[in-house]
Amino acid sequence: MRTEGDKLHFCCANLECVHAMAHLHPEHAPVQGRAGLALRRAAGLTLAFAALEALGGWWTGSLALLSDAGHMVTDGAALGLAALAGWLASRPPSRLHTYGFGRAEIFAAVFNSATMLVIGAAIAYEAYLRLGNPRAVQGATAAAIALAGLAFNLGVMKWLSPHKHDMNARAATLHVLGDTLGSIGALASGLVIALTGWTPADPIAALFICVLIAVSSLRLLREAMHALMEGVPLKLSSDAVGMELARQHGVLSVHDLHIWTLSGSRIALSAHVVVRDLAGWDRTLHALQRLLHERFGIEHVTLQPESSPRAVAPVPLPDPRRRKA
């Protein structure tokens, strides 16, 4: 056995080599680095703004503003967790973790989406209590603070938007989206209260925000749990991929096809490919790899070539009960 970079090569005595290529594609490292930097910056700024918004919510008495500030505290922690998961995912494979640490991003996505559900439930409960016992709210001040929060959250979402293909970054963006909706709700309720004095607008806005957050969180949680169970990524169809592979020149059929998620943005595939001519396998392999990468976004590919089955007359075995003459 020898190690070259992040690839482990296992060779047997007859010089037939099997490559255990649990590798991190070089092109992913810069992308993950940029995503991690964006997440770290967003985490720090979110926590700082959350402290200011919490003071504003306490001063004005706005539940929508306080709930949005609480949201932002958890969002800062979620963004930090996402950044940590991205750093773990960028680490090279090891002999104990030959696929690397990409699953950390999926675990972070599960945790972040689950915490969003808990936060939403807590805010909904407080909003329900306030519907029966409305409190005074300084609508104009609350609206002004919410407007500043909205501008901040839109800026953070813009930073994270280039990384929306990554499940981990999408989970972090979900928290920021919740903050954005919270700012919109706090802004709307503050304006209504300032103009009409109708204080129930504040808890109603909070309840509306909770519903939107719950829908997005459940959708992402379903996708993340599906990935942990090594299901076929929801955006792909194993039937469509298999049929496309089988249509390629030199390929007769495809079987034992498996597609699963390695990390927040990496998809893996393995399959047995029956070909017409094993001598041309290198050319066929490169064509299949290019197809999977360009059309389906699958970059970690393991394909096992098999020769075309031929009808062969069975060779009769000697009857062990027959004695030699």
Image: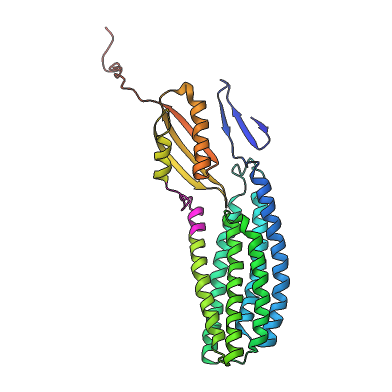
In the displayed structure, does residue 118 sit left or right of residue 50?
left
Q: Is residue 296 above or below residue 18?
A: below
Q: Is residue 11 left or right of residue 5?
A: left
Q: In this figure, what is the number of numbered marks? A: 0
**Residue at (69% x, 53% y) in the render:** 34
10 or 137: which is nearer to us?
137
User: Which secondary structure dominates the residues rendered in magenta?
Assistant: loop
Give the residue displayed 69% in from the left and 58% down from the top: 38
> Is residue 226 a member of the stretch shown in magenta?
yes
- x, y percentage for residue 52? 72, 77
| Residue 244 image offset from top left, x and y in percent | 42, 39
Q: Is residue 47 above or below residue 145?
A: above
Q: Please tell me whether residue 169 belongs to the stretch shown in magenta.
A: no
At 68% from the left and 55% from the top, the residue drawn is 36
**Quadrant in the picture for residue 109:** bottom right
Q: Position of residue 117 (x, y in %)?
A: 53, 70
State the extent of the magenta-drawn residues as a range. Answer: 223-237
Does residue 261 appear anywhere in the picture? yes
Quadrant of residue 97 in the image? top right
Vertical arrangement, residue 315 with respect to residue 263, above or below: above
Kindly tell me whether residue 91 is visible in this rendering: no
In this view, the residue farthest toward the top is 325
Vertical relation: 213 (above or below) 270: below
Query: Which quadrant holds the C terminus?
Result: top left
The quadrant where residue 142 appears: bottom right
The figure's colour scheme reads rainbow
Instruction: Indicate the quadrant containing the N terminus: top left, top right, bottom left or bottom right.
Output: top right
x%, y% of residue 322? 26, 14
